[in-house]
Image (tube, coloured by chain):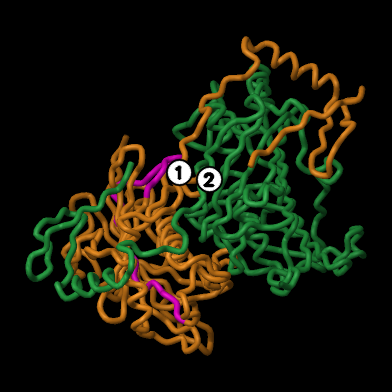
Chain colours: A green, B orange
Amino acid sequence: MKLVTVSYPLNRSGLCLQHSHSLICRRSLAQRRYLNTLHAVESSDIVKVAVSQFPSAAPGRFINDNTAFVQQFPVRGYEVAPNQRASMVTIANLLQELAGNHAVGMWGRAEEGFASLPNAPDIIFVMTRLQIRMNEYPKWGDILELQTYFTDDGRLAARRDWLISDTASGKQIGSATSTWVNINMRTRKLTKLPEDLKIHFMRFADPQGRMSIPVEETKKKIPDLDADLQVEGPSQVARRSDMDMNSHINNVVYLGWGLESVPVDVYDGYELYEMEVDFKAECQAGDTVKSLIQPITHNSGSPEGNGASGTKHFLHMLLKDGSSTHASSELVRARTSWKKQVEL
Amino acid sequence: MKLVTVSYPLNRSGLCLQHSHSLICRRSLAQRRYLNTLHAVESSDIVKVAVSQFPSAAPGRFINDNTAFVQQFPVRGYEVAPNQRASMVTIANLLQELAGNHAVGMWGRAEEGFASLPNAPDIIFVMTRLQIRMNEYPKWGDILELQTYFTDDGRLAARRDWLISDTASGKQIGSATSTWVNINMRTRKLTKLPEDLKIHFMRFADPQGRMSIPVEETKKKIPDLDADLQVEGPSQVARRSDMDMNSHINNVVYLGWGLESVPVDVYDGYELYEMEVDFKAECQAGDTVKSLIQPITHNSGSPEGNGASGTKHFLHMLLKDGSSTHASSELVRARTSWKKQVEL
């Protein structure tokens, strides 16, 4: 489809003689002459542009005998931080989009939610853990290629992994892994995937059970915060625009809330290279959320102390604000790892 | 560039004999046999998928002798509301992305900000008004085609318009217009574009001065709110992740804040078909923002009263919360128009 421009005949005052409801032109003859003069000063009739064609991004498709799914994404301008680089939040959004398109590719597009399992409208997949590791972040206009694949993970869970590459360099710049469980929407309880559905599901699984992050570096316990060491960042308010197709606050929003409490010298002077998130409960638009943070030090028992070799590590907790009758409830626990930014 | 899957030889315990840092496979032989069985039950070697190829979206390019710019955008899953439809906030983000890419196309990619004017690093374009009109909203996975063009608007301002089409139907589903002024970043004051720069700039202007919304329906005054009729919605907190390449809270975030105060029966039962926004001041990450709203009634002097023919109209005001030493300051004034949703 192409949008076509129509040139309208002008009367002496520069007003259109023809117009449609949505396309009205009104310009004085003097202005028209000015423009014509401008066009005339060019040696060629057409003005030269700096970038005449932008690179295209390949749409989603299956690879590896339909056991993995890839898609290219241009990083959009509203998805980058002041340094023009995509943030961890943007990366998480793209991982989710790829997972959603992968599901649509396998099962078809559903009328509601991200995708429904065939013949099991009550059963949904819920992400309980997400770990993203980034070596570098793409800039506005860069085109990323993301690949995803999944397999089962024990009797009750599934694992989905991602590889993140920069198409310009061909280099892998990040990886991610996640754990999913099945919930019966009717009973709101954890459920085992029925055997026939599991067989159906596993037909699309990665036959090698590839892991994008070495297994011994995944699923590391995120400890509770120490009440004496934790610091409370600015409270966050869940927005209506944070609600997603599953009618709950989108998972990725919690990552952003966690990052709000990071000290400003770290947020500005360090690069977030890893984020591990345990999702524990949901909240709704309008809820107020407390974002707590605690630096991980040698004393707290972690082998990776802050300050050593230019890296810093933090524990995070998000709490839904309680009322007089309800205690605060834990929504998310997370760990972030930062490395000192290289001065250019 | 393609991501390639490598099959690793497995030893008897199912562990990889070869692995790279980021690609380790570990699966028991029993699991492998289970998977092989699953694959064997298929009549064909390759499992069938519901959607094998997703539609592609054409990248940005100039049209009309380089006086307009078009780009196609797939609507991403994290950009839609619970009803799977893109929101006004998403549309505004895409308008901004197209404008940014258009600027990059004309002037080249800058190392900071959205795009710098050539030979005038201190002068930036600032949007002071945005009006978006949507007949219908696209769904997740739909591909939009957006077109944009600009021209001068009086001695000091410029106007940028957009047309929004659905590529599947070829139908125009929305339109938008905006007003921009130049600010000298050094003096923080309104400035006239130097004449040589204006000539340079106008070479890319739409020669017909097309308007995507009829001129008499644009730039209508958004009146002050009536203290007796206004209602305060939930306070909003500006997030770090709301900051954009110009190191301020992205314009589009204000639209979302405005919508937070709309009564729930309208937000859920009506469709927002028009939003007019006056941008008056900026705020920073960490600021608390009050979102005020007032229904427009016949009595308030507006010809378009609420309730008539299934439409509702509201005035909005965003205020940066004051402190003991500073009064609250007005950030944004807006008007929204809603039509009753058709039950499907």
Name above or below for residue B308 compared with residue B58. below
Q: CA distance from mark 1 to mark 2?
A: 8 Å
Given the image, on which type of amino acid does mark 1 rest? Ala
Residue A42 seen in the figure: yes
Relative image position of residue B182 (x, y in whole percent): 39, 79
Question: Which quadrant of the figure contains the N terminus of chain A?
Answer: top left
Residue B294 seen by the camera: no
Please indicate whether residue B309 sits to the left or right of residue B276 in the image: left
Picture disc at residue B333 = none
Observer-nearest residue: A339 or B56?
A: B56
Give the structural element (helix, strand or loop) at label 2: loop
- Per the rendered image, the range of residues in magenta is B123-145
Residue A306 image offset from top left, x and y in percent: 85, 67
Position of B78 relative to B327 (above/below):
above
Which mark is drawn over residue B57? 1
The amino acid type, in three-letter code, at marker 2 is Ala
Residue drawn at x 74%, y 73% as measured from the top left: A343
- Same chain, marks 1 and 2? no
Q: Residues within 10 Å of mark 1 (few under 14, many from 20)?
A: some
Main SS category, magenta section: strand
Residue designated by label 2: A57
Is B129 in the magenta?
yes
- Residue B220 relative to residue B317: left or right: left
**Residue A73, position in %: x, y?**
56, 47
Report the front residue among A109 and A326.
Answer: A109
| Residue A181 position by quadrant | top right
Name the quadrant containing residue B160: bottom left
Does the magenta portion include A64? no
Local packing at callout 2 (Cα closer than 10 Å; few below 14, some 14-19, many 20+) is some
The percent coordinates of residue B107 (x first, y second) are 46, 68
